[in-house]
Image (tube, coloured by chain):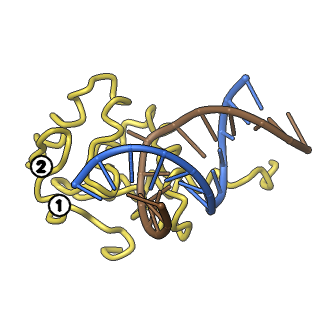
Chain colours: A yellow, B brown, C blue
Amino acid sequence: MNALKTKPNFFEDVYEVVKLIPKGRVTSYGAIAEYLGSKGSSRMVGWAMNQAHGLPDVPAHRVVNRNGLLTGKQHFGSPTLMQELLEQEGIIIKNDQIINFESVIWLPVKEL
DNA sequence: GACATGACGGCAG
DNA sequence: CCTGCCGCCATGT
């Protein structure tokens, strides 16, 4: 009950989009926020990912900031886990930054 | 109910 | 080129 309690659906949308990210591709917080219609609220996406920490079907390691920088790597429990995971998918990372980022970026608002 | 924080983004200096 | 500030919406205290 209590359907008037804000909109947890916002997180569900974020999880769904993140789960739809193709292997070897990444997306940005702003891109997801824009897809959700709340362009500019990239912070909410970051918060959603924080809650997604306990979801095994949410590849948060495929979500980076607008600079292609692994800003959230610190939240994976290991400072190199995120980079290793992305490299396993064919993504090259240098100095915590994704190489050819514009070539691996995946925009839900555009692809979907 | 108000204040402070947050895995960001854009703009100004 | 680099640094700093504001805006965005929701959560936690």
- x, y percent for residue A18: 37, 53
Residue type for callout 1: Val
Check chain identity for marks 1 and 2: say if they share one: yes
User: Between A100 and A35, which is closer to the camera in this rendering?
Assistant: A100
Residue A67: quadrant of the picture: bottom left
Q: Is residue A105 visible?
A: yes
Where is A7 relative to A55, above or below?
below
- x, y percent for residue A22: 23, 58
First-in-chain label (1 vs 2)? 2
The C terminus of chain A, quarter of image: bottom left
Q: Give the residue drawn at x 36%, y 38%.
A: A72
Could you tell me how far apart the alpha carbons at marks 1 and 2 are, in whole angstroms?
8 Å
Q: Give the residue drawn at x 15%, y 34%.
A: A84
- x, y percent for residue A9: 60, 55
Where is A77 relative to A57, above or below?
above
Query: In the shown orientation, is residue A94 left or right of residue A106?
Result: left
Residue type for callout 2: Ile
Say which residue label 1 marks: A104
Per the image, label 2 sits on a secondary structure element best described as loop
Q: Which mark is residue A7?
A: none
Q: Give the residue drawn at x 52%, y 64%.
A: A40
Where is B6 relative to A100, above or below?
above
Q: Is residue A58 visible?
A: no
Residue C6: quadrant of the picture: bottom right
Please report contact status of discs 1 and 2: CB closer than 8 Å, yes or no. yes
Chain at numbered mark 1: A
Query: In the shown orientation, is residue A56 left or right of residue A41?
Result: left
User: Between A78 and A6, which is closer to the camera in this rendering?
Assistant: A78
Q: Give the residue drawn at x 77%, y 50%.
A: A5
- x, y percent for residue A12: 53, 53
Say which residue label 2 marks: A91
Chain at numbered mark 2: A
